[in-house]
Amino acid sequence: MGLSKTEEFVQADITLAKYAKALGHPARIAILRILLERNTCICGDIVEELPLSQSTVSQHLKELKDAGLIKGDIEGKKVCYCINENNWRHAQQLLQSMFVSYTSCNTSCC
Amino acid sequence: MGLSKTEEFVQADITLAKYAKALGHPARIAILRILLERNTCICGDIVEELPLSQSTVSQHLKELKDAGLIKGDIEGKKVCYCINENNWRHAQQLLQSMFVSYTSCNTSCC
DNA sequence: TTTTATTATCGTAATATTACGATTAAAGTT
DNA sequence: AACTTTAATCGTAATATTACGATAATAAAA
């Protein structure tokens, strides 16, 4: 359904899940790659690179912005997008520390 | 809606998004933490640690399994869960390489 | 064999997500 | 001022997700 119950979980897990959820769609990964590819802000031009309508891309951009992974500032007639450095590093660190905490299973049942 | 259109994106992005999506809920992060905490398989006991019903937890487990992040083998009366080592490392590598590809924005518009 | 324990699945309701076209909003351009 | 460009938002339909209780399925235990 989309009931949340997130209040029952620890904050770090909620934050990590929020970042991961934002990464959980190919279009948003593609948007991030465009932003990453050139290490500069992108003012427009994102819609043309994706097989989606302008409104849909705008919606995906909003989700990335809401999750904190990107920033978007108005720059005249266009809007200027780029990675949100602080949160990007934060997400990286949270994910990394979870992934790194894995050590091979020492039982053989799986 | 949940229209997909994933066929229009590159495979690596689709795979990465699939892993990220599975990580996109606090309950599933919590489940993974339980599996990571003890470096052994868990036969049962996962439901008791979460503030969710058995059926809901089972559903989350299924999603983690479908995404490939965990394995679950039948072990007598219980089911034995653990991290899927190969895919775990694959997800880690895909995420890591995306995050690492970021270098600070050299323009000042954002 | 009946009972018990454990997990998956079904049915379902509520909410969220994804996608689009149409419209709006805001700032340049003519 | 009227027009154009760019991006957000609205309205919407279709599908997915999340949650639960109830039921099924399976295997161990009695």
Image (cartoon, coloured by chain):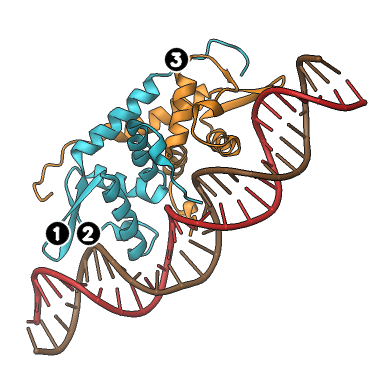
Chain colours: A cyan, B orange, C red, D brown
**For the residue labelled by badge 1, is the local secondary structure a helix, a strand or a loop?**
strand
Residue at image point 38% right, 51% down = A27
Of marks 2 and 1, the one in the foreground: 1
- Tell me the quarter of the picture where residue C5 sits: top right
Instruction: Tell me if A61 is positioned left or right of B5 in this view.
Output: left
Task: Report the front residue among A91 and B29.
Answer: B29
Which chain letter goes with mark 2? A
- List the residue tagged with mark 2: A44
Q: Nearer the viewer, mark 3 or mark 2?
A: 3
Mark 3 burial class by Cα count in 10 Å: few <14, some 14-19, many 20+: some
Give the distance between the C-alpha atoms of the residues marked 2 and 1, in whole angstroms.
11 Å
The residue positioned 57% from the left and 11% from the top of the image is A107
**Which amino acid is tagged 2?**
Gly
The answer to whether C19 is drawn above or below residue B74 in the figure is below
Give the chain letter at badge 1.
A
Q: Which residue is mark 1?
A: A74
Q: Residues within 10 Å of mark 1 (few under 14, many from 20)?
A: few
- Badge 3 is on which residue? A103
